Image (cartoon, rainbow, N blue to C red):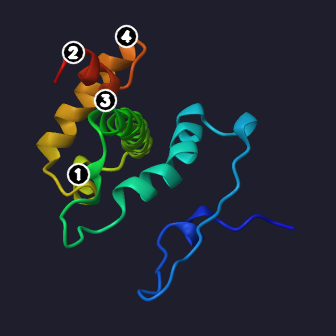
């Protein structure tokens, strides 16, 4: 049996009037560690960040500060991981000779922004970091 291509899972519609369960396999041994981080936190992030504001406002407004801080920590880890994966895809496209303009179209930015980002990715790589990690370390 062959696996379905990842593109078949990329965009899903959800019925507006019912809950929909989303599941996916994770084999920690064969999955990039950062994506294990994302997979291990996505259900909790959806539970916390997904609910719309109610009559009393933001559902998180009743949480204590330590819980909001804990949530922020996990969201931050996921953000850094996803930015690192974005950098990976930018470099894969650039290595294949895809133009800065085309990459910029995917990122909804300018070719100059992509060129600057690639410089930052290279700089971070020299230090063994992703650009997202380097920016985080430097407080950018």
Q: Is residue 55 left or right of residue 79?
A: left
Q: CA distance from mark 3 to mark 2?
A: 10 Å
Q: Quadrant of residue 64?
A: top left
Picture coordinates of residue 45 (x, y %)? 43, 51
Can the viewer see residue 103 in this picture?
Answer: no
Q: Residues within 10 Å of mark 4 (few under 14, many from 20)?
A: few
What residue do we see at 32% from left, 22% from top? 122
Q: Which residue is mark 4?
A: 127
- Distance in Å between CA atoms under marks 4 and 3: 12 Å
In this figure, which residue is indicated by the disc labeled 2? 138
Q: Residue furthest right?
A: 1
Q: Residues within 10 Å of mark 3 (few under 14, many from 20)?
A: many
Horizontal arrangement in the rendering, residue 114 relative to residue 51 (left or right):
left
Dot 1 alpha-carbon crowd within 10 angstroms: few under 14, some 14 to 19, many 20 or more: few
Label 3's element?
A: helix
Q: Which residue is mark 1?
A: 61
Is the residue under label 3 in contact with that under label 1 (CB below 8 Å)? no
Up the image or down, 2 lies above or below 114; here it is below
Could you say where residue 9 lies in the image, as x and y percent from the top left? 57, 68
Say which of 23 and 64 sits in front: 64
Which comes before the other along the chain, label 2 or label 1?
1
Residue 4: image location, x then y, percent:
70, 68
Could you tell which of marks 4 and 2 lies nearer the N-terminus?
4
The image quadrant where one finds the C terminus is top left
């Amino acid at each position: 049996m062959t696996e379905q291509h990842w593109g078949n899972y990329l965009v899903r519609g959800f019925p507006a009037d019912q809950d929909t369960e989303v599941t996916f396999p994770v084999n920690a041994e064969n999955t990039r560690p950062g994506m294990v981080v994302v997979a291990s936190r996505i259900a909790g992030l959806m539970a916390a960040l997904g609910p719309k504001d109610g009559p009393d406002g933001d559902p998180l407004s009743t949480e204590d500060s330590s819980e909001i801080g804990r949530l922020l920590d996990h969201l931050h880890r996921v953000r850094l991981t996803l930015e690192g994966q974005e950098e990976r895809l930018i470099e894969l496209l650039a290595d294949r000779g895809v133009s800065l303009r085309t990459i910029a179209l995917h990122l909804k930015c300018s070719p100059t922004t992509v060129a600057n980002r690639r410089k930052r990715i290279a700089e971070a790589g020299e230090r063994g970091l992703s650009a997202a990690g380097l920016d985080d370390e430097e407080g950018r």
